[in-house]
Image (cartoon, rainbow, N blue to C red):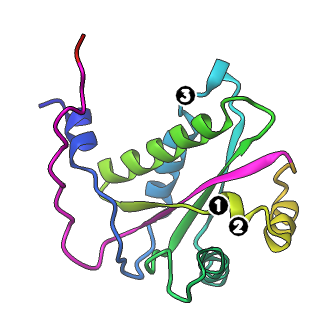
Amino acid sequence: MNETIKNLLERRSVRGYKEDLVPEEVLNEILEAGEYAPSGMGQQGTLMVVTQNPELVARLSKMNADVMGTESDPFYGAPTVVVVFADSNMPTCVENGSLVMGNLMNAAHALGVDSCWIHRAREVFASEEGKALKAEWGVPESYVGIGHCVLGYRSGEYPKAKARKDGFVIRV
């Protein structure tokens, strides 16, 4: 089987991480894959903010948990967070940001790094605290949160794939 197809078929979301950081050179490869994600008309209206700073990761996790109405860690202890933003002035902003998220997670898997897409980035960065962080980071106001891509190394067993649904593909 083709290695790219194999990676796409085998990747799973991981919901439990060790404290070990993703090495800088591996993280850079993952981020480069995100940069090369397709975008509507090639306009590249997305950007990524990445952190391995434990205090900032904890702050982002708490902000996300607040949106969810819980005190649990929605980042599952992952030590690396990549927040993907997209320019809301572009009609394909959600699609563009989603492609970046997909590239990040698939590249991570190909390099032996585990990942999970954590939702609620739009709500987190629409809050006053989120807007202040965006301003601090130099993220333009028109950019909305698409997702938090958490990265790290799993602390438990690798998840098994669920059975695929019948009728997923309709040939006409």
Residue 4, how many percent across, how many down?
A: 26, 34
> Which residue corresponds to mark 3?
38
Magenta-highlighted stretch: main secondary structure? loop
Q: Residue at x 18, y 55 (%)?
A: 161
Q: Are marks 1 and 2 in contact (CB under 8 Å)?
A: yes
Residue 95, how many percent across, how many down?
A: 58, 35
Q: CA distance from mark 3 to mark 1?
A: 21 Å
Q: Regarding mark 2 in the picture, which secondary structure is present there?
A: helix
Q: Is residue 33 magenta?
A: no
- Magenta range: 142-170
Residue 160, how many percent across, how many down?
A: 16, 61
Q: Regarding mark 1 in the picture, which secondary structure is present there?
A: helix
Q: Regarding mark 3 in the picture, which secondary structure is present there?
A: loop
> Which residue corresponds to mark 2?
124
Q: CA distance from mark 2 to mark 3?
A: 25 Å
Q: CA distance from mark 1 to mark 2?
A: 5 Å
Label 2 neighbour load within 10 Å: few <14, some 14-19, many 20+? many
Residue 166 appears in which quarter of the rendering?
Answer: top left
